[in-house]
Image (spheres, helix red, strand yellow):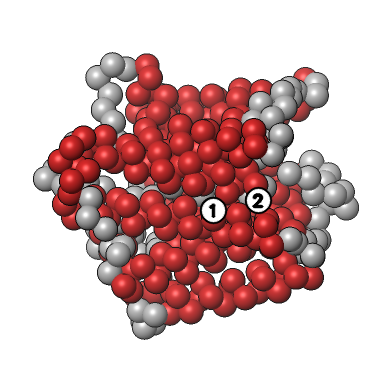
Amino acid sequence: MDIVPLVDRIGEAPTAALFGLIAGVTFGVAAQRSRFCLRAATVEFARGMMQDKIAVWLLTFSTAVVWVQAAHLLGFVDTTEARMMAVPGSWSGAIIGGLLFGAGMVLARGCSGRLLVLAATGNLRSVVSGLIFAVVAQMSLKGWLAPVRDWIAGQWVTSGGRNVDLIAAAHLPEQAGLVIGLSIALFALDLSRRNNIGWTRLVFASGVGFAVALGWALTTALARVAFEPVQIESLTFTGPSANTLMFFLDRTSILEFDVGLVPGVVIGSFLAALVNKELKFQGFEGPTPMRNAMIGAALMGFGGMLAGGCAIGAGVTGGSIFAGTAWLALFCMWVGGMSMDWMLGGRGQPATV
């Protein structure tokens, strides 16, 4: 794909934002139609069920792994130079941040990506939670909470000045990542068959994973032709939510992939809901859900920034390139989400999105 004419025409920063917009719209449409959500999957598993929500999450995750690993083997994605892999990772941040994020997404009734999708369809609860999430994420990045985040993250970091590549660390062949992704995909498809999930939903679930691969491919292509250094990255919503918020509050902010990503998700989700007549205003059901949502959003904002990514950023994007701290953060998100659901007395109840 020759993107040089596009870069020459509109510039590197606007191209990065445009690529973020494209990846965001793809994610927004696919996530809205598939009802993809890590919180729903963890709650379902915590309640002793292996049904549609876990199947959708596994298919999304495995699709991202397959697409990204295949693109890496073909030379379209350079995972070794990805921002998440090229800098030291924090084991302590992944553990504590993952646990906090997992607990928060259960309290808020949706992970950060799901809240963004729901907000675009008229869910006012998600609008409020999303704003709190973005503000706390910004506070954790550059505000009053930044020293606390830095201290926790600095307690245990990866050695060698880089994150850990799990494939290389296990001395597996380069093709192992693709094989692992295909194996998980086969299991997800079998689980989908047993739960009678329609092909339309499966296609859109795969589309969420494809959006992650698309983000990696687009930023890699831009990095190869840009004059200024460009970060190779893909979908995540902790940092981008904070950056997008500041972009609209600070006139000195510049365009980048993050700034296009969040509006893209909103646009894609809105259009998908509009076409399928699913736009609907919804609010809080009472003071307790409102309190839980606000606390949960704050926990996700701090936890996601500490863990190095949200349920998408660490859980799928980081997982797709086998970044060690991302896989640990994802595991801790599952543990944190399941533990919070048990504390709220959810076991034995149906898992709702």
- Earlier in the chain: of badge 1 and badge 2, it is 2
Query: Which amino acid type is marked by label 1?
Result: Val
Q: Is 76 above or below relative to 22?
A: below
Q: Is residue 254 left or right of residue 174?
A: left
- Residue tagged 1: 208
Query: Which amino acid type is marked by label 2?
Result: Ser
Categorize mark 2 by other alpha carbons within 10 Å: few (<14), some (14-19), many (20+). many
Residue 280 in picture, x, y percent from top left: 72, 27
Mark 1 touches mark 2? (CB < 8 Å): yes
Q: Residue 34 got which mark?
A: 2
Residue 179 in view here: yes
Task: Using the rendered view, name the quadrant where residue 29 is placed.
Answer: top right
Residue 83 in view here: no
Q: Tell me the SS state at disc 2.
A: helix
State the quadrant of the N terminus. Answer: bottom left
146 or 18: nearer the viewer: 18
Q: Tell me the SS state at disc 1.
A: helix
Q: Is residue 116 left or right of residue 90?
A: right
